[in-house]
Amino acid sequence: MSNKLLEGFEKFFTEEYDSSDSVMQKLVEEGQQPEYFIISCIDSRANPGTIFKPKPGTFFAFKAMGAIVRPYKQGTALAASLQFALEHMKVPKLILLGHTQCGAIKAMAEDIDDPEIASFLNVAKDGLEKAKAKLGEENGEVLLREAEKQIVLQSMENLKTYPPVANALEENRLEIRGWVFDMAAGAILEYAQDTQTFEPITNLKLTQQGKCCA
Ligand SMILES: [Zn+2]
């Protein structure tokens, strides 16, 4: 097995187990009560376990290519996970985390010639079509950036078809947020209902020359 993983585990062990205020030992003894459920892409660069530097016990994590959420169907991995997290654990915050330069969304836009992958990704075609309708003649990277956002919105709508999500919303005990990790800018964007745009909610600026964001 890769030493990179075991080196990381040693760091984790030292910081989270083998200290007087060990977070993990407390969680093992007392159980977990995560505040968030995060749905993200399988991309290795946009991993919430990396980018949010979470303490153990912070969130339930669910991953799918492109962070794409299909409409509800009983018996899927996501349906069971949401049922557990929202009905049994009463998690109060659900985050749909997309990201820029998403390979899955690019593959979908370019009609990837792989039936297994395409049959999953194509559920998000509506988001791509909305991006095209909004931008008109734009294509290439500009279109992909907009599609990534539209697909987050589409997935958020699909989430509401899951009974535990609908139920938690009805009972007023769930917030759903649509976020995009802008990998080039090093920023988290959130969908704002009032302006209907994704806006930065982090204010850290890249200081490397030529890379600083607008
Ligand atoms: Zn991705």
Image (cartoon, helix red, strand yellow):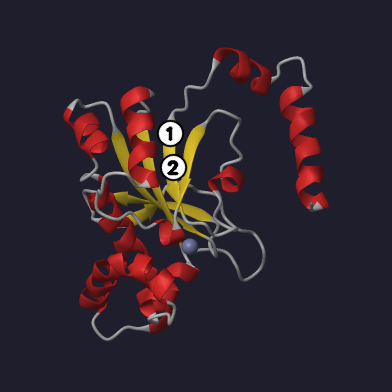
Q: Nearer the viewer, residue 81 or 21?
A: 81
Judging by the rendered image, the residue that carries numbered circle 2 is 38
User: Which amino acid type is shown beneath numbered disc 1?
Assistant: Tyr
Q: Is residue 214 visible?
A: no
Residue at 21 percent across and 27 percent down: it is 172
Image spot of residue 70 (x, y percent): 29, 55
117 vs 97: above or below:
below
- Ligand 1 is within 8 Å of the C-beta of the residue at disc 2: no
Name the residue carrying label 1: 36
The percent coordinates of residue 203 (x first, y second) are 50, 48
- Say if 8 sits above or below 93 in the image: below
**How many numbered badges does the structure rendering display?**
2
Where residue 61 sits: x, y (%)? 49, 41
Nearer to us in this view, 161 or 49:
161
Percent x, y of residue 167: 20, 31
Tag 2's secondary structure? Answer: strand
Asked if marks 2 and 1 touch (Cβ < 8 Å), the reply is: yes
Kindly indicate the quadrant of the structure image that contains residue 31: top right
Q: Nearer the viewer, residue 200 or 36?
A: 36
